[in-house]
Every structure is written in structure tokens, then in C-alpha cells.
Image (cartoon, rainbow, N blue to C red):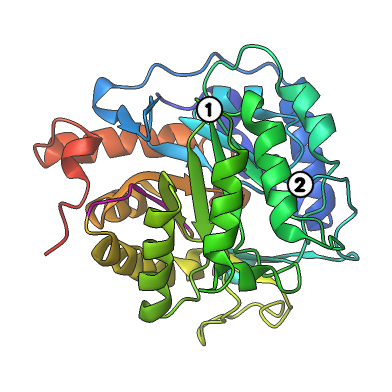
Amino acid sequence: MTPPRTMALFPLVRPLLFALDPERAHDLSLAVLRAAPLPPAPHFPPSLASTVAGLRFPSPVGLAAGYDKNAQAWHPLLRLGFGSVEVGTLTPRAQPGNPRPRLFRLAADRAVVNRFGFNNGGQAAALDRLRGQRPGIIGVNVGANKDSADRIADYAQGVRRMAPAADYLTINISSPNTPGLRALQGDAELPELLAAVREARPAGGPPVFLKVAPDLTDREVDAMVRAALDGGVDALIVANTTVSRPNALRSPHAGQAGGLSGAPLGPLALDRLRAFRVACGGRLPLIAAGGIGSAADAYARIGAGASLVQLYSALVYEGPGLPRRIARDLAGLLARDGFGGVEDAVGSGCA
């Protein structure tokens, strides 16, 4: 699973990308992916395969939502070496998102701040690009329009519409960039939302994952787990970006409004993963996201209770060879510690 030579050129190309506006560089990277001749998807070691919510993932290393918002590059992204790709966030209607600039590199901190606000071309356009055979696990992350009069209805519509094109669906109520959205995580609205989602999911439809914020107290974690179990959620993704700012941030963009992701999010995301593990007591699979940039990071999340991991911001700094490298090194860590596979290692670091 050594990254192909073309991917190894990223250190030479990165200064050119970093000279561009971050959002323009992001759009350019998508265009290059769609046009570049990429090698076939790798053959992962059997030790990396696991079953979560009835789906067989060939590798636990997935791409988080936010990169391929409009389902334009999921096929080449699988060929980069991701075990799964989550597209979106997709809203019922197309919307432009928040005004630019809205994406900021914190290079000194290996981090990113974004305040996109669910900019996307809408679910109908993405649905056309997802039709047909999918050569890998594709998740579809759905959200509500900013100006919606009924956000719960938006989520129900997203589940109903996108279910035929998804291996799993993610309910994103944890973005900090749509005013009031995170209120749906609360005791009052979350049960109602999950009941609407459950009713909207077609019989035999894909499993539903819930993506949560890292900025939750232990009491809020417990309440969310109870609601998720009662509401038929199949897995939790822990966690989205944070509105907090660690004191150690050095970048001049650290004070920009929006969600912080990348390396500085790691400790908080790991702490909240552990809290969700305790609250779940093994009753719900957990998927770790936030600050994962190496096999060691992925292995630590698996040991803390995650069945799968997702990354995104680390690609900005490490380049397209990262998913293959993490998968290769993770297989080595599992073998070193005597685990037959990922599933044997889940929760191994929990007391």
C-alpha cells in the first residue's frame, strides 16, 4: 500500500497550493482528482476489515464529510485509499453558504478554521452523480437549509431522498456555521428529529449515523446517547469541528469565527470519544473524527473505542498519499500488538 509516485510529489506541489486562497486551492484539488490518472484502489490487508452497522468496511480509514461536498470526486477518492468516503453536507435546496473568505489555514498549528455554512449544490444534483454502482462504501451527510422554516422536515426529506444513493446516511446537527443548528442536539428537539428521520427512512434503507459536536458536557453526552438509542441511530460520529480555541494556537487566523479542525482538535475529540464510550457502554458503534493525521492517532482512537476513523484536515498538510500510509502503518501496529484485526483492538485501551 505504498503511495504511488505521483502522490509522493505532494511536498513539491504544496507550496504552490498554499500560495492560493484556501478555498480556491480546495476547488483546484477536486478538479485535479477528477482529471488525474489514479491507480486502482488498494487491496487492504484482511486485518483492516470490519463490520459496522451491517456494512463491511475494507479499511477503517474514511474521508470525513466536507471535502467532497457535492459528490463530485468520490470515485477517485476511494482510489486514493480510503475505506469509505462521506459526501456532503447536502441540503434539500442549493445554497451559497456564508460570505467569503470562509476557509483559513492555520499552518503553524496544522489546523483549519472554516465557516462555510453548508454551501452546496443541493441534493437533487448530487443524487444524479451518485446513481449506479458504487465501488466502495459511500456515506451521504445531510443537513438543513439555513433559511428553512422547518429544519426537522429538511432532515426527513434528506433521508428520504438520498437513501437510495447511500450506503449510510449521516445526520449533521453539529456544524457551528449554521445559526441555531446545534440546538437540535438538545433534549427538547433531538428525540423529535430522530423520530422524523426514523419515519422517513425507507424499509430496508441504509443505516443512520449521527454526527455530534465535541463541545458537549458529560451530561449532554449522556442525554444524546439515550436519545440516539431510543431513536434507532446505528452509530455516532465523534466529533465535528469545535468552536473552542486552545491557548497554544500560534496562527494569526486562530481568532477567525467558525469551526476549528486539524491537529489542535485531537485532544478534545479523543476526550469526548472516551466520554461517549462510557455513556454508550458498547451499545452503539463509535466513529472517531477530529485531529487524526497518522496511524498512531487512528490507533489511539480505536483503542479508545472507535470502530472506524475519519479524517479531512490532515490531507491539507500531508497530501493524497495519507490514507494509504495510515492504512499500511495501522496494519503494522495491529500486528505488532498481536491483534488479529481492527475489531479485536476496539476499546483495547479502555480501563
Residue span colored magenta? 282-289
Q: Position of residue 65 (x, y in %)?
A: 62, 46
Q: Position of residue 81 (x, y in %)?
A: 49, 28
Does the segment drawn in magenta span residue 283? yes
In this figure, which residue is indicated by the disc labeled 2? 26
Look at the numbered discs 1 and 2 and tell me whether their residues touch, using CB distance below 8 Å: no
What is the tally of numbered marks visible in this picture? 2
At mark 1, the secondary structure is loop
Identify the residue shown where x is 75% and y is 38%.
Answer: 29
Determine if residue 67 is in view. Answer: no
Camera-side residue: 326 or 306? 306
Camera-side residue: 303 or 248? 303
Quarter of the rendering containing residue 240: bottom right
Does the segment drawn in magenta span residue 287? yes
Left or right: 234 as drawn, with respect to 82: left
Left or right: 11 as drawn, with respect to 136: right
Camera-side residue: 158 or 66? 158
Q: Position of residue 172 (x, y in %)?
A: 61, 55
Q: Eyeballing the image, is 93 above or below 176?
A: above
Q: Nearer the viewer, mark 1 or mark 2?
A: 1
In this figure, which residue is indicated by the disc labeled 1? 203
Q: Eyeballing the image, is 84 above or below 241?
A: above
Q: Measure the C-alpha gap from mark 1 to mark 2.
A: 37 Å
Q: Amino acid at mark 2?
A: His
